[in-house]
Amino acid sequence: MSCDASRSTVYGVASTLMLMFLVTWAAAQSLEDIDACNGKNDTSAEPQITACTALIKLSGDNSKISTIAYNNRGNAYTGKGEYDQAIQDYDEAIKLDPKYAKPFNNRGVAYQKKGDYDRAIQDFDAAINIDSNYTNAFANRAETYRKKGDYPRALKDFDQAIQLQPKLIDLWNERCWTHAIVGELQAALTDCNEAIRLEPNAAAAFDSRGLTYLKLGHWDSAVADYNAALRIDPKLPTALYGRGFAELKKGDPAGGNADIAAAKTIEPNIVREFSRYGL
C-alpha cells in the first residue's frame, strides 16, 4: 500500500525491553528512571526521554545500560515523529553493541516512516541476520516491501512472521490485506477470518475483509464488514471509503457519497489509494 498511512502497522517500536539493573549500581532515583526509560505504565515521550538521558549519563562504563537507554530513547523520539533524532540514538546503540538486533529493527522503522524504504530494508535485513527468529523485523520488512509495491516479497515475509508467531492478529490481518490487493481473494478471506477469530473486536480485520468482499463484488457482505469496523473505530478512513464505494454499487448515491466525503476529510489520498487496488 503506497498510500496506506491510515492502516500502517509498526512492529517492535514500543519500549518493552527491560534495562539491565545492578543493585550495587543504582540508587532509588535510578530505579524510577529505569521504569520511565522502559516506558512502564505507558510513560509519555518527554518523561521517557528525560529518564533515558539520565541513565545514559549515569551508566559510565556500563555499555549495556547505555545501549538499551539509547534504543529506548530512540523509540520515544520515533513516537514523537522526530525520526532524525531517533536515528541518531539508534546509531549510538548500534555503535555500542553491533550484535544487538533491536536498534537495527527500530532504526528501520524510523527510516520507513521517513519514506526511505531501501535504508529501512537494509536495517531489517541486519536485524534478521543477527536474530533469524525476529518476528517484528520480518513483519516490518513485509510492510516496507508492500509500500514499495513488492507484494511477493511482502507475502513471503508475512508467511515467515506468522510461522514464528501464529497468534499475532496483526500478521494475519496484514497478510489478508496484501492478498486482497494482489487479487488472491480466497487466501485473503482465510487470513481475515483467522484474524477475526483471534480477535472478534479488531476493526482492521473487518476493514480488510471488507476490501476483499469489494474486490469479489459482494457488496452486501462488504457493507456488513465495514459497519462492524466502524462500530469499533468510527473514523477509520479505509472503512468509510470502502463502505461508500459499496453503497454506490448498491445504488445508494447519498449514503455512498457521504461516506466517501468523510473518508477524504480524514485521509486526502484515499481515492488514489483505492484506485491502486483496482477500485
Image (cartoon, rainbow, N blue to C red):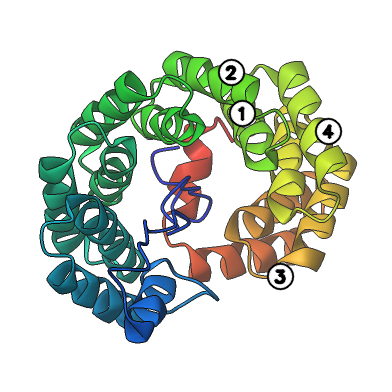
User: Mark 3 and mark 2: span between their CA atoms?
Assistant: 31 Å
Three-letter amino acid code of the residue under disc 3 = Pro
Is disc 2 placed on a helix, strand or loop? helix
Identify the mark nearer the N-term, 3 or 2: 2
Is disc 1 placed on a helix, strand or loop? helix
Which residue is at the front of the view, 50 or 111?
A: 50
Q: Quadrant of the N terminus?
A: top left
Is disc 3 placed on a helix, strand or loop? loop
User: Mark 3 and mark 4: span between their CA atoms?
Assistant: 21 Å
Identify the mark nearer the N-term, 4 or 2: 2
Label 2 with label 1: CB-CB less than 8 Å: yes
Residue position marked by numbered label 4 in the rendering? 193
User: Mark 4 and mark 2: span between their CA atoms?
Assistant: 16 Å
Place residue 75 in its image quadrant.
Answer: bottom left
Q: Quadrant of the C terminus?
A: top right
Residue position marked by numbered label 2 in the rendering? 159
Three-letter amino acid code of the residue under disc 4 = Asn
Q: Picture coordinates of residue 202 (x, y %)?
A: 76, 53
Let me know if residue 182 appears in the view. no
User: Mark 1 and mark 3: span between their CA atoms?
Assistant: 23 Å
Residue position marked by numbered label 1 in the rendering? 175
- Residue for point 88% across, 50% down: 224
Residue position marked by numbered label 3 in the rendering? 234
Q: Is residue 171 above or below residue 247?
A: above
Three-letter amino acid code of the residue under disc 2 = Asp
